[in-house]
Amino acid sequence: MKIGIYTLGCKVNQYETQAMETALRAAGHEIVAFDGAWDACIINTCTVTAVSDRKSRQIIRRARRTNPGAVVAVCGCYAQSDPETAAALGADIVGGSGDRMGFLRALEAAERGVSTDEPMARRSFEFLPAGSLSGRTRAMLKLEDGCTNFCSYCIIPHVRGPVRSLPVEDAAREARRLADEGYRELILTGIELSSYGRDLPGKPDLIDVLEALSAAAPALRLRLGSLEPRTVTEDFCRRCAALPGLCPHFHLSLQSGCDDTLRRMNRRYDTARFFLSVTLLRQFFDAPGLTTDVIVGFPGESEAEFDATLSFLRRCAFTGGHVFPYSPRPGTPAAAMADQVPHAVKLERAHAAAMVVEELAETARRAMVGRTVPVLFETEEDGCTRGHAPNYMEVIAPGLLRGQVLPVTVTGVEGDLLIGRAVPGKEAKGIL
């Protein structure tokens, strides 16, 4: 059958969608454009904010309206948190945040007109095949699912459940397979990647699995997803720096640069501990990419607290990041807090913080001019190829270079792109 797919939310959702696409194609189904005609569709939803909920509902309504006779199957975090509404909006199949293969079996049965009462599991780690990006140059591998941090603004621990991890040996086996198939980079994802291994025998941690992946597939570039700042210790940095394929790009979720705000958010660190992580990474890595997420307009955030966040962003000198105005999520402690910040003020602060982040990113890009870095080229267009440097900055160079890792001398900056000259035929060695 023809199946359209729509994905909202994070990289874990993207990974799980790609895994479902792989399984569906292997079963003989055709993946088609979501905006066209299909026999069935999958909507992989998000519930991280109230805005995410609204978008998920809109897509379900749209799918039901545009293909009224087809099967609409909804999975993901919104479907986990509010399955009754998803069904009321027109979903024929409602899964959740786990058991993607059981969800696909239910979809196939519904398309055949067969009902199934097969329960969908959620509390154990479900191994899914690594998802492909950019024409088999990069792949994603989910190492971990679930979270038990319970930040005051976040519903995810309730819809994703406790921490479940992919065993080290299974992760290493998958990395070796992907390297043998010709992939050049492996992006490691998780709902709370820093919690990796706490549920496994012997409690291996994130650096243990990174070392195993590097040993199993030394030719693969390894790229980390978002990290909790306390993960970054001197031992972690020293062992990471010894891995030849680890990309020096570290995404540390800040959320606020004010200690009082961090306490209300129920974050487990303060700005001093966060800045220690930044300092250690710059001590052990040459010009690493340091990116972050920031929430502005959190309940109770005063002008002084917001100014503290702006100052801390500059102090950390991030190379990029994302800024979000706080969005109340029903069911979380923050949604019931007093002193909610007016919407207009949140938007104003988000704009101001985004301007600071962009200024820092532009400074970081300008500092790359004249440097030579190994770039994994991924997508070709109009006689040029784009790819990523190890620090995750996007680079464009003349030539049809997809799938190659070539040394590139950065000659300029155009918008958010680095402009460079590649050395064709001279395969880059290592990361730095």
Image: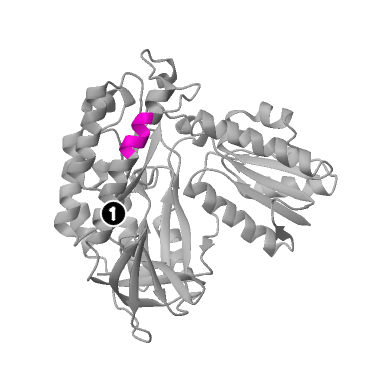
Q: Nearer the viewer, residue 122 or 46?
A: 46
Examine the image and state in which quarter residue 151 appears: top left
The amino acid marked with disc number 1 is Glu
Query: Within the magenta stretch, is there residue 282?
Result: no
Q: Is residue 354 left or right of residue 329?
A: left
Residue positioned 45% across, 78% down in the render = 401
Residue 299 against residue 427 in the figure, above or below: above
Q: Nearer the viewer, residue 106 or 320?
A: 320
Residue positioned 20% across, 53% down in the render = 281
Instruction: In the displayed orientation, state which residue is furthest to the top.
Output: 338
Q: Is residue 55 left or right of residue 310?
A: right
Q: Is residue 116 visible?
A: no
Q: Is residue 418 left or right of residue 113?
A: left
Where does the image place residue 135, in percent across and percent down from the top left? 54, 69
Task: Report the quarter where the C terminus lies.
Answer: bottom left
- Residue tagged 1: 362
Indicate how the structure is coloured in the image: one colour
Count numbered badges in the picture: 1
Query: Within the magenta stretch, is there residue 350?
Result: yes
Q: Nearer the viewer, residue 249 or 175?
A: 249
Where does the image place residue 411, in percent across and percent down from the top left? 28, 71
Magenta residues (range): 348-353
Residue 47 against residue 251 in the figure, above or below: above
Where does the image place residue 57, in percent across and percent down from the top left? 64, 33
Q: Is residue 72 visible?
A: yes
Q: Main secondary structure of the magenta part?
A: helix
Examine the image and state in which quarter residue 282 appears: bottom left
Q: Nearer the viewer, residue 261 or 146?
A: 261
Residue positioned 43% across, 59% down in the render = 171
Where does the image place residue 229, in percent across and percent down from the top left? 26, 42
Residue positioned 49% across, 77% down in the render = 383
Task: Report the quarter where the N terminus lies.
Answer: bottom right
